Structure formats: C-alpha cells, structure tokens
Amino acid sequence: MENSNSYISGIGSYLPSQMLTNKDLEKMVDTTDEWIVSRTGIKKRYISAKEEATSDLATKASLSAIEDAGISPNEINMIIVATFTPDMMLPSTATRVQKNIGANNASAFDISAACSGFIYGLSIAHQFIINGTMKNVLVIGAETITKYVDWSDRNTSVLFGDGAGAVVVSQNSNGAKILGFNLGANGNPPREWLMLAGGGSVNRDENILKGKKNFITMNGKEIFKFGVNILPATITTVVKKYGLTNEDIDLVIPHQANRRIIEAAAVILNIPIQKFYINIDRYANTSAASIPIAMFDARKENILNKGDIIVLAGFGAGLTWGSMLIKY
Ligand SMILES: CC(C)(COP(=O)(O)OP(=O)(O)OC[C@H]1O[C@@H](n2cnc3c(N)ncnc32)[C@H](O)[C@@H]1OP(=O)(O)O)[C@@H](O)C(=O)NCCC(=O)NCCS
C-alpha cells in the first residue's frame, strides 16, 4: 500500500435556529450579561429544539462539508462522530448520519473524548488516509449540550451551546496536507471536575434524576487552570515535533471554552492574540463542535486561507487534549 497525504477537502457547519442571549439568561438564573461577557467572552448561544437530535445537527453540517469537498456521499469511506451528547447509547449517532446523508459505502462510529473529540477524530481519519486504505473520511463534532444543562446552575448553564461542524479529510492534493498531531489524556484528576454522570453503567437507577446526574457538573476553577496550561503545552509540542516555530503559525483555531483561557494561552506562547480565531461570543462552548464551526467561520471571513499553516487545539473532560498541525 502506498503512503499518501491527507488534507482537509471540505468544511461545513450547522447551528440550530433558536438563540438564547445573556439577557435571556438573566431571566432564568442569578447572573448578568456583564458577568458572562467579562468572565467568558460569551454573548449568546444556540439551542436545539426539543425534537432536534445531535444527528440532525450532524447531518446538516455533514452535507455542507461534503458539498464543499465537491464529492458525493457515496464516496465517503468512513464517518466519525465526536460527541458526548449522542442521540442514544445505542446505536451510534454516526450510523444515523450515514443513513441521513446516504453514505452507503461508509463505515460509521462515534468517539468519546469530550471537547477534544474532534481532534481525536481527525487523527483517526488522518491514519486511514495516509496509509492508503481510504480516500474520504467524514469527521463531525456535534453536540446538543443544552439538553444536559441544569438551567438553575449558574456555574454551568451560561457556558454551553449546541451546534455541529464537520470536515471531509481526503487523499492527496496540491500542497495542502495534515502535518501531524499531538494527543493526550490524564484520567487521574477527579471525574467531578467535568462530568455528565447519568446514563452510563455507574448511574442507571432512580438516583440519576434524584441526584441530578443527568446534568453537567463542573469545577470551573480546576478546568480553567487545566486549559490555560494544556493549550500552550500541546501547541508547543506539535509545532516543535514537526520542526516549525511559533512564528511559522498563521492561525491558531482553539477550542472555544473561555476567551480568557485563549488569551492566557496566547501570552504563554508569545503568539499575538490576533492569530487566534475566537467566535465564542456567538456560540458559547459547543464542545466537540467548536473547532470545526470555528474553521468554517474563519474561512468564511477570509481569515483561514489556502496555504496557511494552522494549529487546531482542544482540551476537555477526561482529562483529554489534542492538537493538529495543518497546511490548509
Ligand atoms: C466557570 C468560569 C467562567 C468561572 O469564572 P471564574 O472567574 O473562575 O469565577 P469564579 O468561579 O471565581 O466565581 C467568581 C464569582 O462569580 C460567581 N459566579 C459564578 N458563576 C456566575 C454566573 N453565571 N453569574 C454571576 N456570577 C457567577 C461565583 O459564585 C463567585 O462568587 P463569589 O466570589 O461570591 O463566590 C471559569 O472558571 C471557567 O471558564 N472555567 C473553565 C470552564 C470550561 O472551560 N469548561 C469546559 C471545558 S471544555
């Protein structure tokens, strides 16, 4: 089997139609627009409708990415959905997307790596393309997090939003290529730092609802510190690993968890903040979806251009992290 290059051949995104502003949240929980904007950078977020599943958002983002790649769904060899809010435990969200888009020649599965899930998924796609076994892999980050938010908990309810982003990773191109990645995990810190406990094998009884285990819980301060440390660390690792320096980077597209985390990372890395794409103001934290949505927006705004050297970087529950170095 011949070794090939992998590159991003298409990008798509989809946001649900219903929007919730910070002002709306002021009426629901003890918070203020001023607090949310100053502590996180978030101004609004999108909310999936009651009947709208993660696969519905994923399907729309996928169709937009496939159209952008200029291929037909039949040409997709594999579908990977990164999500921590799947339609159900079984079957996978990815098989639903496969049916919805008519990707009849694709294998399909979900992966669980929280907000790092899209980077993990991209690294899997990269392997299948560079070893020559596949031509087109669809990688989707899709979440309906607001269905798992306790709207009375101001520590979490102001932070999250719903959405989906997708990319097609394809074989060969004229110069564009995925250069490499860095992935990591540390399962030692308490799971309570960022957790959605209900529904898994640990919490299957009536205590799920009684104990509010069907909602996200978080230790914001610990996760904040983790993010500020790990974003620069994983970016530095991937940039050095492939013989580049921070000056070679045209654009960093980080996971959108908190504007202050991104700003702190920029200072540690000594990369101007202008080189970081930030759209958290519009969508809040959409977990696995945030990086592909940001890629889509950055390209639409002509901030992401052909030939750019970019770094994608994410971190999240687990703890997990990952970065990806790309010549777009
Ligand atoms: C959650 C987060 C925004 C809180 O910001 P912070 O600056 O650490 O704020 P603190 O937790 O110190 O809280 C400061 C005060 O604001 C209050 N507060 C918390 N949430 C609030 C809200 N939504 N509205 C108003 N006040 C709030 C706290 O109760 C606290 O009040 P006190 O000083 O009287 O005790 C921040 O810790 C964070 O972003 N963490 C990372 C979260 C994350 O990224 N999660 C996903 C990772 S993938």
Image (tube, rainbow, N blue to C red):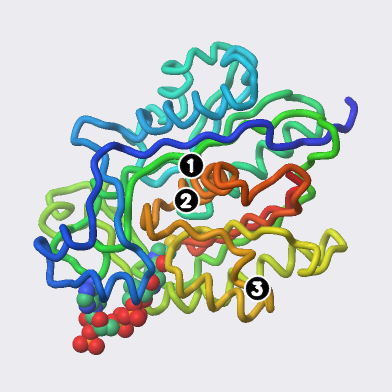
The number of callouts visible is 3
User: Residues at badges 1 and 2 in contact (C-beta under 8 Å)?
Assistant: yes
Evaluate whether residue 118 shows in this view: no
Q: Which mark is residue 184?
A: none
Q: Which of the two labelled residues, at mark 2 and mark 3, occupies the earlier sequence position? A: 3
* Lower sequence index among marks 1 and 2: 1
Image mark for residue 272: 3
- Left or right position of 108 against 177: left
Depth check, mark 1 against mark 3: the one in front is 3
Secondary structure of the residue carrying tag 1 is: strand
Query: What's the distance in space between the residues labelled 2 and 3, CA to CA?
Result: 21 Å
- Asked if residue 146 can be seen in this view, the reply is yes
- Under circle 3, the secondary element is loop
Residue lying farthest to the right in this orientation:
2
Residue ID for mark 2: 290
Quadrant position of ligand 1 = bottom left
Which residue shows up at 79% across the image and 39% down it? Answer: 176
Which of the two residues, 113 or 312, is positioned nearer the viewer here?
A: 312
- Mark 1 and mark 2: Cα distance apart in space: 8 Å
Q: Marks 1 and 3, Cα distance to the nearest angstrom?
A: 27 Å
Circle on res. 141: 1
Residue 84 x, y percent position in the rendering: 39, 47
Picture layout, residue 282 above or below residue 174: below
